[in-house]
Each structure stands twice: as structure tokens, then as C-alpha cells.
């Protein structure tokens, strides 16, 4: 599934004992969420939720489960802490007169609530509230895959688990999705015995779903609709855990469907199905809904967070979340933070990477505590379209052949008179004319409606075959169509359409020749649709996706009403890849119950193998999953809850005690089974720690290779006893890689038996420099440190400005502010600033005389909000880099002005792209990767003014802003 953002506000904090959060430029940019509208919000509070709480409050005992244990919802400590958190939620909401939709206490400490913009503004600045995040709506992103993965081989993971019938026994896989079709034999309860221990979940009855449908296989089933809204559900969906689309049944059966289940589609027996962990139990948490006419199907974050909270409390061991966004989400959003606490509680989480490939930076789920999964091919299912002119075109097909040539027509040429050309070319239901289609092969374009719906329309109109054509580069999918069909790429499709326009055109769908078979693409290969990295929200410092798994033409259980009456069908997407990893994660849980989620993730990654041609880590992550090797990886890279907290500290998150003294650990140094540096200045050293999870002492030697860089590992070898750890460093020095161009490679530790491989991605930059430098006019200069990344002898510094202004002195009283319709008055003052063409930067800096006041700053251009700084502090700052020319309106609002009006000084700077002659910056000789000190010197400044300028570096895209006075 993909997620579409609904006016998401910037993230300023993260759940879990967090006092506040800022970023390095928070004071000078619109990083704080101060402009609110009416709507639904997820509100986060300061204390740790149950899954992370370690007893820092002397009045309450710790609730975080010990390693290998699960949460006990009936324990006195859990009940007391939940009640404590809930009471704080209620008190805060009572003050603003709001009623919560959901209460979150297990993986998140917060609520989901509908708020007016006025309520939101007040609640955001209530003590104990750290974040208001707009709710977002999301979209949902096998018969031979277990064999392809080698699970059934002698000595494989199934054999190690006691055979296929015992693979995953005692483990519960929680699936957050569109529901489940419990009558499918993949979920037959009698096949699982006994019931998993320490299970506290529930089976919630609803529309066409009785509690009796649950048992030892389907141990839990819940549904969440408050976010989506009951009134918005399609009549064809079910207000219950029952699956309305088939997506949830498909992902669940892929992860942990029963073994030995016969698969029949349209009366044809096509094989025997098994999930990855067939003896595991499953629990469904339905959050995704089909929408009524005019309402898009989707899954709201508020519902998903509620589901994650329940899943952890219920006692799941693994969670699959094949849901994602239309753009990359933040590691600090509520869903990501819920999964962080789930990981803290020992739960392995698999997420789909998204289906927006093959473009760069199209993925979702960048958080390092989840395993983000790419989709790969794994089956070779092809036929050829044989045209009457002798031409043949090979495409994907799982259907029977059409050996007798039949007339070939385009869908548009065979449409009903009342159908539009666009609807007809896509073969929408009811668009084709039986008089023109009967007995013919019809060409349908890919897009909009389901691929299989197109062939059903051709069949309805009497067609005997279908040629499905891509209209742009995309994947080929061997869906199980009801008539002989083949799926062609855009180039072949264009040729077939051109031929169809000639008189007497015919086509057949036939088996391949030996030469065509030999020319088929090998498997596994990353699909075109699979979303790619690098991650943008982490600055490229977290390497995603993590791993690849089968995701193209996967056969699994579906919901018959929404799938043409079928119990099984072929689906494609990273949604299908993710449950493969979730199920394999369940097998790892069974074999290694004491492993942390990070260790399971590490084992899967370091044992993976390259796909056939698309070996970029931004496409395949660490590679294609190899579960049998993952069961005995040799070394793992462990990461504990405080490691992830330290990573969040590096993002600007400030934790409350007892985590307020944790050091910042940037993404490149987070202990992961991959290495990524999004801005490497010449030379950089990263640190990693490995643990020997083998049964014997072993000596490992390192091999590191990143073309365009030199990589030095220290120590380059070590001997490690079982369960012992070893810390090492890797120093990367840029060689021939051009600046701002990614270089990729790998680091492998080998002991002769195990090969522990980590992907590496490095992006060299010209310089690492602070975003802001400040000094007093009287000081005359300021020094600051930078790290050069270029091999140039000097940094090539240049300046724009300094520009001096006399601050505007004014005052403002307390008053409301409507960001959609700002109005000046006693509580809001407005100033106009003209920005000419070619402006380097504009900064608007508000300094309050009363530091107990709370003033907010908003910047508009032509009525559109283009910048804001609206924290809980008295002083605010907004900076625009290379702003468009025009007139800007700068609003100062008095959110809280104790004692009446509050006086302030407002400096509005507009800096041209030229030096003013009053600022110089040293340009000393430098060595790449070695920090150096620069001196900014100013002269001839008016003490009555404040000054602002911009320092640039040759070849660099980043700058340093300088404020004087």
C-alpha cells in the first residue's frame, strides 16, 4: 500500500519520554508546527509508553518486558502506568474541550483527537504535550516462493524447525492490513496445536464475522475505523475484521498460511501453497478500508497506531505492515515511533518499501528499527504474442495458450458507442462491444483499474485473448487472467498496436521457442515498480531498502467477493515482498528466541545475495533474502533501544530523564548491518560492533571495497568467542568519486564458513560546515570549524552581504491567528518586505523583550504561507534561501503576552548575491577530511544596526548564514 499525506505538519518531536525536539536550524526555519487547521491529530505526550517505560518515575514500576518476554496486560505495573498516562491525556484534553478518538499507551504515549485550529494551537503549547501531527491516510502497498527460497531443502530452515508442519510453531505474526478471509484453508484453525503461550489478544465480532472463526491459527482479529470513519466505508466492505479487498488475506497467508493447501483458480489446480512460517499463528488488525463512491480506499495513521498498540499488548512476535506513503515519511512520525517501541519490546517489524520505482528516492519507511523490503521477481512465466506478419513479442503470462490465430483489435476500436476512448483503452467494465470483440484478441492498456479486471471485461464481451500493454517503462506481471493473456512492455506494445491497425491483423498467444527461453531475464531481479533509495528524510545516512524478497506474481489467499469469486490470486507489489520477510522473521524468532529484532534484521541482511543485474543497494538493499544462511549468520550487528534513542538525539530530539544524557549517534555510526554517509567530506570514520552468534570461537577477516574510495578496516581481523562482541572502525577516503555522486560497495567479514556482507553507500561533498554563525559587532570576528571534502588546496570561500538593518521596534498583545486568513490587529502585526530578483537569502528575525512571552512569526507571499517559526519560545526566526522575487508579508502574532502587550524588535534582511565589502572569510590551505578553522571578519558596521550575510564554499550546495549584532 502507498500512503497519501493529508496536510501533514512538520514533526518536532518523537514519542517516548521526550522533553522537546529541535533541529539544527529549528530557530531559523519553519520547523515548528505553529499553523493549525481544523482536523484530526495524533497528539504525543512526554512520558514513555508501556513498551519502553523502565521505571524512571519512583511512583511506578517498570513495564518494559525483559528480553525474551512479552508484555503482561494484566500486571499491576502495566495497569497503573497506563492509567497514569491516560489521566494526563484526559486532563490536557479537558482543558481544550476535546474528546479523544483513540488512547495510545503501549507503543505510543498519546491520543488521536479531532481539534479545531484554536484547540490545536492551545494544546500544542500545553505542558507535557510534545507534538501535534496531522493524521494521514495510507494506501495498501505463493505457491512456489518457499521452494525458490530453499525453505524446503534438506537442512534448511524448515528442517531446523522440526519440519514444515512445525515451522513457526508458537510464534504469532500480527498483520496490519485490510482484514482476513477466515474461511480460506490457509487459516484453518485445526491445523495448529497447541495455542501460542502468553497470548492476550481478542477476536472481535462484527459484520459477517463471528468470534467462533478464531482459534489456534487465527488467534486474534480486531478492526479500527475511527480514523477512516464508518460513514465512509463502501457497501462491499465489512465493518469487521473480514477482508474487503483481499490484500490482507494475501499478505497474511504469504507470511504464515498453513502448509499443504491445494490452490485452485477458476477451476484449475495450479499448485500447493504454504506461508513462510506455516505453523505460526496469525492475528489480523484491520485498518485499511474500501471507500464508498467518492471516498478513496485507505488506512489512516490514527487507526494504524491504535492497531500497533494493541498488537504489542496482545503478544505478537512479528508485525507485517504492507502500507506506505506517497512520499517518504519521517522516522519521527507516530507510526514509525510506534514501531520503535514495538522493537524495544522484542517484536520484529517488516515494512514494504513502496511501489513508486524505478525512480530514485521514492521509498517509504526509512526508520532503522524496521526492516524495509524491496520486491523482486522469482518465477519465469512467459509466452509470446505471435502476429500474423511473423513478428513475435515475449511477455509475462501464467495463463493457457491460444494456439489458433484470432483477429487482433485495439480496445478503442472495439468499444461501445457510449464509452469514452480513454475508458475503453483501459478496458473498463462495460466499455467493450460484444459485436466487435467476440472471437478476437483485444489489446488493453495498463493503468487505473486492476490488470485482471481488464481481461474479465474482454471475456465478458466475448474475446478469446488479451494483450496487456505497458504505456511507459514498468514491470511485467503474469496475473492469472480468465482468458489467454500476455503482458508486454511499452516498446513491444506500441509495435503490436501499430500492427493491429493494419487490415486482417491476427494474433495468437503461444509457447516460447528455445531461443526465446534462453533470452529470458534471469531471476531474482528487482522489479521496476519497487521503490528505490536513497532516503531523503535521513539525509542519506540510513541505507534503505534493507533487503529484497519475492514480490512479483505471488499466489496467495484473497477475498472472493472482490476477486471475481476466487479464493486465490496472483498479486504483485512490495506489499507481497514484506510478508515474506515477516514470515522468515518468525522462523528466526522460533530458532533464536533470544535474538533482538535488530539481530534478526542483521542476520537476514548480511546473508543476502545479489539479484541478477540490479545490484545497487538503493534497489536491493543488502540483496535477495537467503533464509537458510540467515539461520546461521556467524556475526550480527546488535542495536538496543538506547542506540535508537541516541540516533534520535542526533536528529535534534531531546529526551527527558533518564535518557537526557544519552550521546548523539548520527546515522553513519548507528550500529546497523549497512553503512551510509549522505555527506562525506573527504575522509570519515564510522564505528560498528558485531556479535558472534555462532557456537564456536571463530577468526574473521575483513574485505572492504567501494570503487572511488579507499576503505581501511581496523582491526581487519579478530578472533571472537561465542556471544562475545568486537568493535571496529572503517575509514573511508575519497578517491576518484565525483562530488555529490553516490559510490556503492560492501564490507564482508569471513571466517571460511560464514560470509557476513554489509552494503555501503557514500556520497562525497565539498564541505561540511555549520548552518549558522553569530558574533557581536564589537568582537570584529568569529571563528568556526568546517571539514573540507574536496581535494582543492582551499575551500574557495565567498560572501554575500553583510546587509545591515535597523530593527523595527513594535509591540503586540495576545490574540488569535488564522493561518488560512491572517488579519492584522492588536494581537497580530504585519510588515511588507520587497525581495528583488537574484536575492541570495532573506531572513526575518524576531527578538522579544519579554522572554516569558510566546510570539510567533509567519511569512506569506501572495497569500501563501511560505515560512514560519512558531515554537513555544519568545524569539523566532525564519530564513528563505534564494527566495522568489516579490512582496512578502511578515506577520508577528502574540500567542501569549504576559502582562498585556509585549515589545519586540524585528529585523528583516534581504541579501543580494554580492559582497558588501564589510565581511571577509579566511581561505586557508586545507586537507580533505581534516577539520579546519575559518575566521569571519567584519569591519565598518553601525552599532545601531544588526547585520546578516551568507558564506558560500566553492563546489558546495550548502552555505553558512552569519548574523552580527
Image (cartoon, helix red, strand yellow):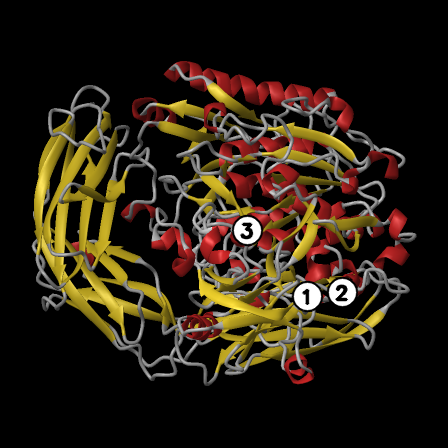
Q: Give the SS element for disc 1.
A: loop
How far, Cα to Cα, is label 3 from label 2?
Answer: 29 Å
Q: Which of marks 2 and 1 precedes in the sequence?
A: 2
Locate residue 895, reporting x and y percent: 25, 27
Q: Which of marks 2 and 3 precedes in the sequence?
A: 2
According to the picture, the residue beneath numbered tag 2 turns out to be 148
At horizontal 77% and vertical 50% (from top left) the residue drawn is 263
User: Is residue 22 left or right of 902 when viewed as pictured?
Assistant: right
Locate residue 460, reporting x and y percent: 54, 49
At horizontal 34% and vertical 22% (from top left) the residue drawn is 119
Locate residue 893, reporting x and y percent: 19, 31
**Residue 254, disc:** none
How far, Cα to Cα, is label 1 from label 2?
Answer: 7 Å
According to the picture, the residue beneath numbered tag 3 turns out to be 367
| Observer able to see residue 700 | yes
**Residue 378, disc:** 1
Q: Are marks 1 and 2 in contact (CB under 8 Å)?
A: yes
**Mark 3 Cα shell of 10 Å, populated few (<14), some (14-19), many (≥20):** many
How far, Cα to Cα, is label 1 from label 3?
Answer: 27 Å
Q: Are marks 1 and 3 in contact (CB under 8 Å)?
A: no
- The residue closer to the viewer here, 840 or 370, is 370
Amino acid at each position: 500500500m502507498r500512503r497519501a499525506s493529508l496536510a501533514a505538519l512538520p514533526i518536532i518531536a518523537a514519542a517516548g519520554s521526550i522533553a522537546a525536539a529541535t533541529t539544527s536550524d529549528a530557530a531559523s526555519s519553519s520547523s515548528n508546527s505553529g499553523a493549525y487547521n481544523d482536523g484530526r491529530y495524533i497528539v504525543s505526550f512526554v512520558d514513555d509508553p508501556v513498551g519502553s517505560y523502565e521505571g524512571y518515575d519512583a511512583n511506578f514500576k517498570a513495564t518494559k518486558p525483559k528480553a525474551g518476554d512479552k508484555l503482561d496486560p494484566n500486571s499491576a505495573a502495566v495497569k497503573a502506568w497506563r492509567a497514569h498516562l491516560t489521566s494526563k491525556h484526559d486532563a490536557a484534553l479537558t482543558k481544550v474541550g476535546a474528546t479523544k478518538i483513540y488512547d495510545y499507551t503501549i507503543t505510543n504515549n498519546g491520543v488521536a483527537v479531532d481539534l479545531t485550529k484554536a484547540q490545536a494551537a492551545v494544546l500544542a503549547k500545553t505542558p507535557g504535550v510534545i507534538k501535534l501531527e496531522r493524521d494521514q491516510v495510507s494506501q495498501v502497498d505463493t505457491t512456489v516462493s518457499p521452494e525458490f527460497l530453499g525453505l524446503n531443502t534438506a537442512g534448511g530452515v524448515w528442517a531446523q524447525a522440526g519440519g514444515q508442519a512445525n515451522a513457526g510453531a508458537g510464534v504469532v505474526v500480527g498483520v496490519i492490513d485490510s482484514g482476513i478471509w477466515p474461511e480460506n484453508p490457509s487459516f484453518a484453525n485445526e491445523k495448529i496445536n497447541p495455542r501460542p503461550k502468553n497470548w492476550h489478544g481478542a477476536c472481535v465480532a462484527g459484520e459477517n464475522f463471528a468470534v467462533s472463526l478464531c482459534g489456534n491459527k487465527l488467534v486474534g482479529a480486531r478492526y479500527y475505523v475511527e480514523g477512516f470513519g464508518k460513514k465512509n466505508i463502501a457497501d462491499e466492505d465489512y465493518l469487521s475484521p473480514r477482508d474487503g479487498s483481499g490484500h490482507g488475506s494475501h499478505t497474511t497467508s504469504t507470511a504464515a498460511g498453513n502448509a499443504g493447501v491445494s490452490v485452485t483458480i477458476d477451476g484449475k489446480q495450479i499448485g500447493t501453497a504454504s506461508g513462510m512460517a506455516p505453523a505460526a499463528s496469525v492475528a489480523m488488525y484491520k485498518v485499511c478500508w474500501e471507500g464508498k463512491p467518492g471516498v478513496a480506499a485507505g488506512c489512516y495513521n490514527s487507526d494504524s497506531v491504535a492497531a500497533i498498540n494493541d498488537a504489542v499488548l496482545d503478544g505478537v512476535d512479528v508485525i507485517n505492515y504492507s502500507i506506505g506513503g506517497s512520499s517518504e515519511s519521517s522516522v519521527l512520525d507516530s507510526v514509525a515511533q510506534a514501531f520503535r517501541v514495538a522493537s524495544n519490546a522484542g517484536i520484529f517489524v517488516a515494512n514494504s518499501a513502496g511501489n513508486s520505482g524505478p525512480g530514485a528516492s521514492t521509498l517509504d519507511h526509512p526508520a532503522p528499527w524496521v526492516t524495509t523490503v524491496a520486491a523482486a521477481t522469482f518465477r519465469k512465466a512467459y509466452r509470446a504474442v505471435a502476429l500474423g506478419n511473423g513478428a513475435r513479442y515475449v511477455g509475462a503470462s501464467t495463463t493457457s495458450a491460444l494456439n489458433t490465430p484470432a483477429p487482433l483489435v485495439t480496445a478503442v476500436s472495439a468499444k461501445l458507442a457510449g464509452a469514452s476512448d480513454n475508458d475503453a483503452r483501459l478496458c473498463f467494465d462495460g466499455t467493450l462491444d460484444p459485436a466487435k470483440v467476440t472471437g478476437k484478441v483485444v489489446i488493453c492498456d495498463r493503468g487505473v483499474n486492476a490488470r485482471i479486471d481488464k481481461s474479465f471485461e474482454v471475456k465478458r464481451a466475448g474475446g478469446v485473448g488479451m494483450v496487456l500493454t505497458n504505456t511507459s517503462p514498468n514491470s511485467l506481471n503474469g496475473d492469472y487472467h480468465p482468458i489467454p493473456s500476455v503482458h508486454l512492455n511499452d516498446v513491444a506494445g506500441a509495435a503490436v498496436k501499430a500492427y493491429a491497425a493494419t487490415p486482417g491483423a491476427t494474433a495468437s498467444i503461444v509457447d516460447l521457442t528455445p531461443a526465446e527461453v534462453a533470452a529470458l531475464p534471469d531471476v531474482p531481479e528487482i522489479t521496476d515498480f519497487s521503490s528505490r533509495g536513497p532516503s531523503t528524510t535521513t539525509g542519506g545516512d540510513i541505507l534503505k531498502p534493507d533487503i529484497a524478497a519475492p514480490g512479483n506474481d505471488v499466489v496467495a489467499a484473497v477475498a472472493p467477493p472482490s476477486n471475481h469469486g476466487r479464493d486465490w490470486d496472483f498479486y504483485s507489489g512490495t506489499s507481497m515482498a514484506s510478508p515474506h520477510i515477516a514470515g522468515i522473521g518468525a522462523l528466526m524468532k522460533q530458532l533464536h528466541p533470544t535474538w533482538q529484532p535488530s539481530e534478526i534484521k542483521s542476520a537476514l541482511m548480511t546473508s543476502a545475495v545479489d539479484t541478477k543485474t540490479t545490484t545497487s543497494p538503493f534497489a536491493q538493499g543488502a540483496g535477495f533474502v537467503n533464509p537458510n544462511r540467515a539461520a546461521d549468520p556467524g556475526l550480527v550487528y546488535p542495536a538496543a533501544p538506547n542506540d535508537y534513542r541516541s540516533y534520535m538525539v542526533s536528529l535534534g530530539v531531546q529526551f527527558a530523564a533518564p535518557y537526557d544524557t544519552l550521546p548523539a549517534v548520527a546515522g553513519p555510526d548507528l550500529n546497523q548491518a549497512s553503512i551510509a554517509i549522505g555527506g562525506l567530506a573527504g575522509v570519515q570514520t564510522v564505528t560498528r560492533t558485531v556479535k558472534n552468534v555462532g557456537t564456536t570461537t571463530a577468526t574473521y577477516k575483513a574485505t572492504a571495497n567501494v570503487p572511488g574510495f579507499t576503505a581501511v578496516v581496523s582491526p581487519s581481523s579478530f578472533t571472537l568467542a561465542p556471544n562475545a562482541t568486537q568493535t571496529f572502525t572503517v575509514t573511508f577516503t575519497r578517491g576518484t568519486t565525483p562530488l555529490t555522486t553516490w559510490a556503492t560497495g560492501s564490507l564482508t567479514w569471513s571466517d571460511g564458513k560464514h560470509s557476513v556482507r554489509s552494503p555501503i553507500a557514500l556520497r562525497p561533498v565539498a564541505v561540511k560546515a555549520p548552518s549558522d554563525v553569530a558574533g557581536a559587532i564589537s568582537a570584529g570576528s568569529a571563528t568556526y570549524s568546517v571539514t573540507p571534502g574536496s581535494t582543492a588546496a582551499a575551500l574557495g570561500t565567498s560572501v554575500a552581504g553583510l546587509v545591515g538593518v535597523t530593527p523595527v521596534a513594535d509591540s503586540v498583545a495576545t490574540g488569535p491567528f488564522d493561518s488560512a486568513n491572517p488579519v492584522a490587529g492588536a494581537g497580530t502585526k504585519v510588515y511588507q518586505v520587497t525581495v528583488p530578483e537574484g536575492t541570495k537569502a532573506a531572513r526575518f528575525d524576531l527578538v522579544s523583550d519579554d522572554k516569558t512571552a510566546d510570539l510567533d512569526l509567519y511569512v506569506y507571499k501572495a497569500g501563501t504561507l511560505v515560512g514560519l517559526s512558531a515554537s513555544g519560545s519568545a524569539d523566532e526566526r525564519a530564513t528563505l534561501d534564494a527566495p522568489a522575487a516579490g512582496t512578502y508579508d511578515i506577520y508577528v502574532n502574540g500567542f501569549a503576552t504576559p502582562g498585556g502587550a509585549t515589545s519586540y524588535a524585528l529585523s528583516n534582511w534581504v541579501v543580494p548575491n554580492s559582497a558588501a565589502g564589510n565581511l571577509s572569510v579566511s581561505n586557508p590551505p586545507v586537507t580533505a577530511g581534516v577539520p579546519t578553522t575559518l575566521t569571519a571578519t567584519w569591519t565598518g558596521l553601525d552599532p545601531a544596526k544588526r547585520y546578516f550575510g551568507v558564506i558560500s564554499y566553492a563546489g558546495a550546495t550548502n552555505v553558512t548564514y552569519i548574523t552580527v549584532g
